[in-house]
Image (spheres, rainbow, N blue to C red):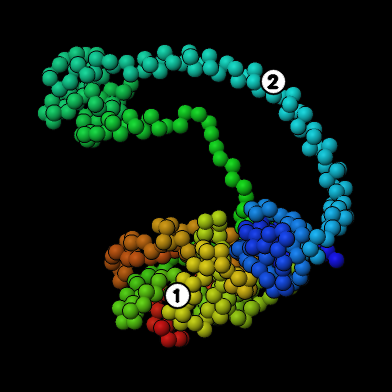
Amino acid sequence: MAEIVRMPKMSDTMTEGVVAKWHKNVGDPVKSGELVAEIETDKATMEFESYQEGVLLYRGVEEGKAAPVDGILAILGKAGEDYKDLLATETSKSAAPAEEATPKTEAPAKSEEKAAPKAESKATPAPAAKQEAAPVAKSTPAPAPKPAATVNGSTDDRMKASPLARRLANEKGVDLSKVMGSGDSGRIVKRDIDWFKPGMAVQSANAFSNAVTEESFDEVAVSQMRKTIAKRLAESKFTAPHFYLTIEIDMENTMSARESINAVTGSKVSFNDFVVKAAAAALSQHPKVNSSWLGDKIRVNHHVHIGVAVAVEEGLLVPVVRFADSKTLREINAEVKTLAQKAKDKKLQPAEWEGNTFTISNLGMFGIDEFTAIINPPDACILAVGGIQQKPVVKNNQIVVGNVMKVTLSCDHRVVDGATGSEFLRTFKGLLENPVVLLGQASI
């Protein structure tokens, strides 16, 4: 007997899935545990294996199209079996809402038809406007005598160039006709001669010829990942009362420690690895920051699972380094690299992106000094990390060049108070400014 294969719920936040690729065609036999399709969820593209057996009679979703969770993905049955009654019965369950929505969708269509002639009538003057503008455009290069009044000492007052600019042009052998003036009404002034380089006029002309002169745009379908990012972060921002704590950290000792570790071990430990390790150690001492808001209760986590935000083509993924406080710098480095690559390849599995108790978002490698991040549910806090900057600092009553890094802790005020967040940051700062204490807790 024919039976329906439904779109599976492959992550805790998944509401619909996109069929990235079918591995079975209509008429192909399907065995239990056999790969049927690749389904793109809100976080990764995952393989879907059938739990049923039979012949693929019907594919309910085309490649690249979406279906809601529990929607019809496919129908399996015996070869040649009639499945249309089953499909019709299933379709009729959701037909009523669609029929109710039909008048609403027709109404705008009619109004668009009525509006069409008006739109055309408004658009018709456009060509005329262009024709009127054409003579103006042709007359804009008014200083036509420019080529004649070059560097031969001409005193033609019609040339829009200052006397000083003319003299400098003569001395440097610059043809004024090839110089674009930056003064009033396009007048050539001294700075134009000083900045002029051969070929500038040609480049400028090409730049203007490639300029967009008509309105245009692209509309890109919202991916499953982007939909989930929009939903979850909007809920977080507008339901969790955020407040922010920023602190500046002296990174001199961490920089020296990193250089020594990489030289001795031959590994390439990053500053982000130090940040993850220091955050994990500080969370162990301040479990209230390592907590979650659950509505009628607060969950205080004793384990430390740190989510590390990774930028991918379609948005942002947060793979999780589990039990980060018990791992060495090199273990953290290797795990983050592996997870980041899997995220970019859309190969992350649910166990690799779920269960975070704290999140770190680092934009320092992009040259960002400091920023604030939106809390990643269910965490109570997220740490935004900026880049290491050289700036004047006071040491031993003297102003010297220092290397500092700013971090900002976003806190859910329902869980974390200002004093609690500040104590965590003070511990975190102390560990990075004295990495010997940090590294003394575990091997490198």
**What's under tag 2, amino acid-wise?**
Pro
- Which of these two is toward me, 94 or 285? 94
Left or right: where does residue 141 sit relative to residue 178? right
* Rendered location of residue 57, percent (x, y): 77, 59
Q: Residue furthest front?
A: 80
Residue drawn at 73 percent across, 26 percent down: 113
Write down the residue under mark 1: 333
Specify whether residue 149 is in view: yes
Write down the residue under mark 2: 117
Q: CA distance from mark 2 to mark 1?
A: 63 Å
Residue drawn at 76 percent across, 70 percent down: 53
Specify whether residue 414 is in view: no
For marks 2 and 1, the one nearer the N-term is 2
Local crowd at mark 1 within 10 Å, few (<14), some, or many (≥20)? many
Q: Quadrant of the N terminus?
A: bottom right
> Does 334 sit above or below residue 65?
below
Left or right: where does residue 153 sit relative to residue 327? left
Which corner quadrant of the image does residue 37 belong to?
bottom right
- Which of these two is toward me, 423 or 256? 256
- Which of these two is toward me, 368 or 2? 2
Left or right: where does residue 341 sit relative to residue 286? left
- Which of these two is toward me, 336 or 160? 336
Residue drawn at 55 percent across, 37 percent down: 217
Q: Quadrant of the C terminus?
A: bottom left
Residue drawn at 24 percent across, 18 percent down: 146
Which marked residue is nearer to the observer: mark 2 or mark 1?
2
**What's under tag 1, amino acid-wise?**
Asn
Q: Secondary structure at mark 1?
A: helix
Residue 59: mark: none
Local crowd at mark 2 within 10 Å, few (<14), some, or many (≥20)? few
Q: Secondary structure at mark 2?
A: helix
Which corner quadrant of the image does residue 9 belong to?
bottom right
